[in-house]
Image (spheres, helix red, strand yellow):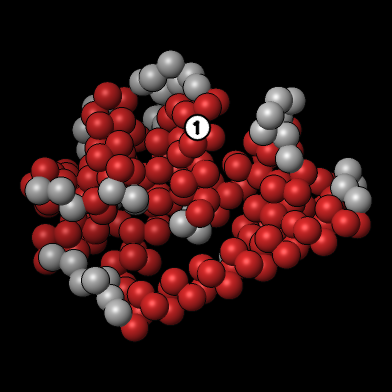
Amino acid sequence: MRIFPTTIIAMLSLLLASTSWSDDFAIGQQAYDSGDYETALTKWQPLAEDGLADAQFGVGLLYANGFGVSMDDDLALKWYGLAADQGHGQAQCNLAVMHANGWGVPQSDEEAFKWYSLAAEQGVTPAQISLGRTYSNSFGDELDNVQAYKWFTIAAGLGDDDASYERENIASRMSPEEISEADLLANAWMESHQNLQANHLEHPQ
């Protein structure tokens, strides 16, 4: 059984707490959390078909991991893709994972990088870590220690324990000027992200 990171799965509960959702979605979330995946699919599938991005992500998660259904990469890609196209950060991250590993699609670092980048901008820390590693480990045009340090700093600021280690490792290959530049970029991103969150709380959709 393939399991995506539990931090991604848990995000649904966090989103649920701050947004007005339908009763069916909430019932599906509770069923998912308790391991009743059949009920989760029953509740989420109609909402996914109606275009609710969080439900599309949830259905994709079930098929990607084989929770309550047979594992089906094609269906996982379908539902992740629909949610990702609507700007769902967790779906974008999981779609990147599938492209990075060649699950259901030809392996593509380029596609993975694209989706990791979109998810990272929305504050998805696993995507930020993966993006930082891409920037720090690449041998081509994507090699960029400043960007790597920036994303590790942001992920660390959002509570990822591994990010601090990754940041210190990349710092050994950087000049003080590069570190200063990366810190400025990270601080600017954090300030913008905090402003977006505050605006969302003041003016929920």
For this rendering, which residue is in front, 4 or 131?
Answer: 131
Decide: is 126 above or below 106.
below
Q: In terms of depth relative to the viewer, which is nearer, 195 or 20? A: 195
Which quadrant: the N terminus?
top left
Question: What residue does disc 1 label?
Answer: 112
The residue under the point 77% across, 44% down is: 145
Residue 36 at what x, y percent from top left? 22, 49
Q: For numbered disc 1, what is the local secondary structure?
A: helix
* Residue at the image point whose x is 28% and y is 76% from the top: 204
Q: Is residue 195 left or right of residue 134?
A: left
Instruction: Tell me which amino acid carries mark 1.
Output: Ala
Q: Quadrant of residue 98?
A: top left
Q: Is residue 165 left or right of residue 89?
A: right
Identify the residue at image location x=24%, y=71%: 205
Please name the residue shown 68% across and 60% down the image: 185
Query: Which residue of the protein is positioned furthest toward the bottom in this rendering?
Result: 202
| Relative to 194, 14 lies left or right | left
Q: Position of residue 199 (x, y in %)?
A: 39, 78
- Quarter of the image holding residue 22? bottom left
Q: What x and y, as percent, mark residue 52?
A: 18, 52
Q: Residues within 10 Å of mark 1 (few under 14, many from 20)?
A: many
Q: Position of residue 173 (x, y in %)?
A: 88, 43
Image height of 38 relative to 105, above or below? below
The reply to whether residue 150 is in sight is: yes
Judge whether residue 71 can be spotted in this image: no
